[in-house]
Image (spheres, helix red, strand yellow):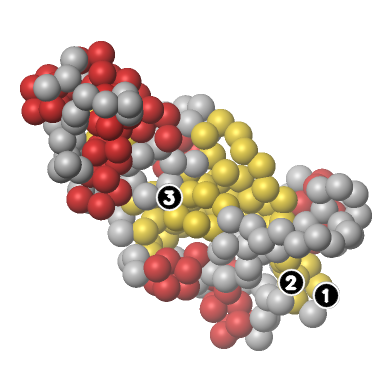
């Protein structure tokens, strides 16, 4: 039997069509490609429109297909796997074969919120560098970063070109090699400003990483990054070990 043929048998027709469309989305079409319309699929495979809707709907729910109102159904972009180790976004994207780009939206001396001041070990009301950047890969907006940097560890940070790898800049210009991070990960819906920067709808799912990074035991960075939930996933290796403190304690850094 041809793998692209639907026949009567024990396997429901909508499941057969789902498998055909899955192969199409995973192996044949590049991300963002349109699939045939419901009408064309029904005619090509000699099934009902209800059968087509069931098959397509399952793949939309799985994230392999995405619907655009008034435009049709498309293969979804592949999710990138966020590895939990300390590496710059720039280096990570280049390793994956993408062209990284960064837009700096803000870099200024500002008084950080109490939580960030405490993370950096700053006294109340002491200014720190507030850096906001939009990160892209092959032109696609992937993440918004909003971070605070210790002013005495990286004095004059705002005078540098901040469109490349910040970790490389810190090492080259300040002799600061970031070597440890503690990170918290959660999910939330996008606020209007973050949605605008990422080119998604307000309320779209995001993966959020808050990372406090240090060098030789001295805190340098308190960064929160909002990653597009439709383009990112997190994979962790879990071993049977006793948590350091509490049931959800974890270590790690975010690219």
Front residue of this view, candidates 156 and 21 = 21
Between marks 1 and 2 in the image, the one whose residue lies nearer the viewer: 2
| Left or right of 5, for residue 14 | right
- The structure residue drawn at horizontal position 82% and vertical position 53%, both measured from the top left corner, is 249
Q: Are marks 1 and 2 in contact (CB under 8 Å)?
A: yes
Q: How far apart are the alpha carbons under marks 1 and 2?
A: 8 Å
Which residue matches tag 3? 79
Q: Are marks 3 and 1 in contact (CB under 8 Å)?
A: no
- Secondary structure at badge 1 equals loop
| Left or right of 91, for residue 167 | right
Above/below status of 127 relative to 73: below
Number of marks in picture: 3
- The structure residue drawn at horizontal position 20% and vertical position 15%, both measured from the top left corner, is 49
Which quarter of the figure is the C terminus placed in? bottom right
Front residue of this view, candidates 44 and 133 = 44
Q: How far apart are the alpha carbons under marks 3 and 1?
A: 34 Å
Q: Earlier in the sequence, mark 3 or mark 1?
A: 3
- Secondary structure at badge 2 equals strand
Which residue matches tag 1? 217
Which label number is shown at residue 180?
2
Near mark 1 (Cα within 10 A), the count class, few <14, some 14-19 or many ≥20, is: few
Q: Earlier in the sequence, mark 2 or mark 3?
A: 3
Between marks 3 and 1 in the image, the one whose residue lies nearer the viewer: 3
- The structure residue drawn at horizontal position 34% and vertical position 65%, both measured from the top left corner, is 98
Which corner quadrant of the image does residue 13 belong to?
Answer: top left
- The structure residue drawn at horizontal position 9% and vertical position 28%, both measured from the top left corner, is 44
């Amino acid at each position: 039997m041809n793998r692209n043929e639907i026949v009567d048998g024990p396997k429901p027709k909508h499941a057969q069509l789902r498998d055909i469309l899955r192969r199409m989305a995973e192996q044949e079409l590049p991300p963002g490609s349109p699939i045939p319309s419901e009408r064309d699929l029904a005619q090509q495979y000699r099934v009902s429109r209800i059968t087509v809707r069931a098959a397509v709907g399952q793949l939309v729910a799985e994230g392999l297909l995405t619907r655009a109102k008034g435009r049709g159904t498309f293969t979804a972009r592949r999710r990138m796997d966020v590895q939990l180790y300390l590496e710059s976004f720039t280096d990570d994207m280049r390793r994956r074969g993408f062209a990284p780009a960064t837009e700096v939206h803000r870099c200024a001396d500002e008084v950080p919120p109490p939580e960030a001041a405490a993370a950096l070990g700053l006294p109340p009301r002491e200014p720190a560098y507030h850096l906001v950047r939009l990160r892209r890969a092959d032109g696609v907006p992937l993440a918004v970063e909003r971070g605070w940097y210790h002013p005495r560890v990286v004095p004059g940070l705002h005078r540098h070109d901040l469109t490349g790898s910040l970790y490389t800049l810190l090492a080259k210009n300040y002799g600061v090699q970031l070597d440890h991070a503690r990170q918290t990960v959660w999910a939330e819906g996008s606020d209007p400003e973050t949605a605008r920067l990422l080119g998604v709808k307000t309320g779209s799912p995001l993966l959020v990483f808050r990372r406090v990074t240090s060098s030789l035991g001295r805190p340098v960075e308190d960064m929160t990054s909002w990653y597009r939930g439709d383009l990112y996933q997190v994979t962790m290796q879990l071993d049977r070990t006793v948590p350091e403190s509490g049931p959800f304690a974890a270590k790690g850094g975010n690219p």
